[in-house]
């Protein structure tokens, strides 16, 4: 008998927004400016993301988010092209 598959961790819309910008290489200050929130709030979102995903740092959180499907390559490409403009 196999065990049921565990559901991937859930993230809020704002957490996904923060994580996408982290994946695109933005700092907390840049993310805060782009989302209209303070850098401290960004850090709080990151802490909650780490807890939810079981991540140790930004890179680990991004890797896990890609694994769980919270970040797609299409989203990253869109963010990168927007940043280049």
Image: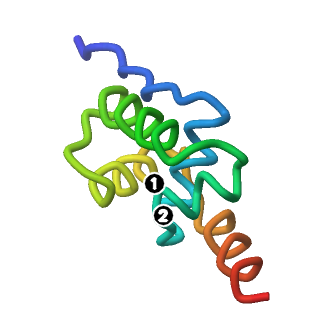
Say if 34 sits above or below 84 in the image: above
Residue at 61% in and 68% down: 76
Residue 16 versus residue 29: which sits nearer the camera? Answer: 29
What number is the disc on residue 66? Answer: 1
Res. 1 image quadrant? top left
Residue 4 versus residue 1: which sits nearer the camera? Answer: 4
In this picture, residue 33 sits left or right of residue 40: right
- Binning the other alpha carbons within 10 Å of mark 2 as few (below 14), some (14 to 19) or many (20 upward) gives many
Kindly state the secondary structure of the residue where label 1 is placed.
helix
Query: Which x, y percent locates residue 68?
Result: 45, 42
Query: Which x, y percent locates residue 27?
Result: 46, 64
Query: Which x, y percent locates residue 83?
Result: 70, 80
Q: Looking at the rendering, in which quadrant would you find the C terminus?
A: bottom right
Residue 41 versus residue 46: which sits nearer the camera? Answer: 41
Whether the residues at callouts 2 and 1 have beta carbons within 8 Å, the answer is yes
Residue at 48% in and 60% down: 22
Kindly state the secondary structure of the residue where label 2 is placed.
helix
Residue at 35% in and 34% down: 47
In this picture, residue 16 sits left or right of residue 55: right
Q: Which residue is mark 2?
A: 23
Q: CA distance from mark 2 to mark 1?
A: 10 Å
Say if 38 sits above or below 80 in the image: above
Say if 78 sits above or below 75 in the image: below
Res. 84 image quadrant? bottom right
In this picture, residue 38 sits left or right of residue 52: right
Query: Which x, y percent locates residue 80?
Result: 65, 78
Indicate which label's residue lies in the foreground, 2 or 1: 2
Residue at 52% in and 59% down: 29
């Amino acid at each position: 008998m196999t065990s049921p598959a565990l559901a991937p961790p859930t993230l809020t819309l704002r957490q996904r927004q923060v994580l996408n910008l982290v994946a695109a290489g933005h700092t907390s200050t840049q993310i805060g400016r782009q989302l209209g929130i303070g850098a401290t709030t960004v850090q709080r979102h990151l802490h909650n993301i780490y807890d939810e995903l079981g991540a140790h740092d930004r890179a680990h959180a991004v890797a896990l988010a890609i694994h769980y499907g919270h970040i797609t390559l299409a989203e990253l490409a869109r963010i990168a092209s927007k940043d280049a403009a």
